[in-house]
Image (cartoon, rainbow, N blue to C red):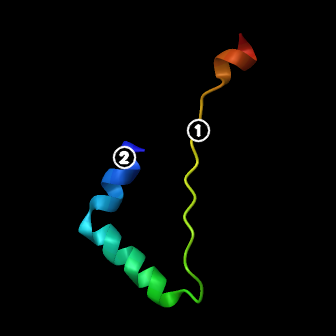
Amino acid sequence: MAAVRAHFAVPASGAFVAEMRALSPQPPVMRVFLGEDVTARVVG
């Protein structure tokens, strides 16, 4: 999440979001998913 927050703190990211809002007929929705490595549980 720290990387996502840092990414959206960049002015260009804010400008991109503003442009997308202007182009979208509905408010944009952003979903962030977390991943987890489960290899050890599956293999071990």
Q: Judge the density around disc 2: few (<14), some (14-19), many (≥20) Cα neighbours within 10 Å.
A: few
Residue at horizontal 66 percent and vertical 25 percent from the top: 38
Q: Residue furthest left?
A: 11
Q: Judge the density around disc 1: few (<14), some (14-19), many (≥20) Cα neighbours within 10 Å.
A: few
Q: According to the image, label 1 marks what residue?
A: 35
Query: Identity of the amino acid at label 1?
Result: Gly
Residue 41 relative to residue 12: left or right: right
Circle number at residue 4:
none
Element type at mark 2: helix
Q: According to the image, label 2 marks what residue?
A: 3
Query: Identity of the amino acid at label 2?
Result: Ala
Query: What is the x, y in percent for residue 12?
Result: 28, 71
Residue at horizontal 55 percent and vertical 75 percent from the top: 28
Q: Quadrant of residue 37?
A: top right
Residue at horizontal 74 percent and vertical 19 percent from the top: 42
22 or 44, nearer to the observer? 22
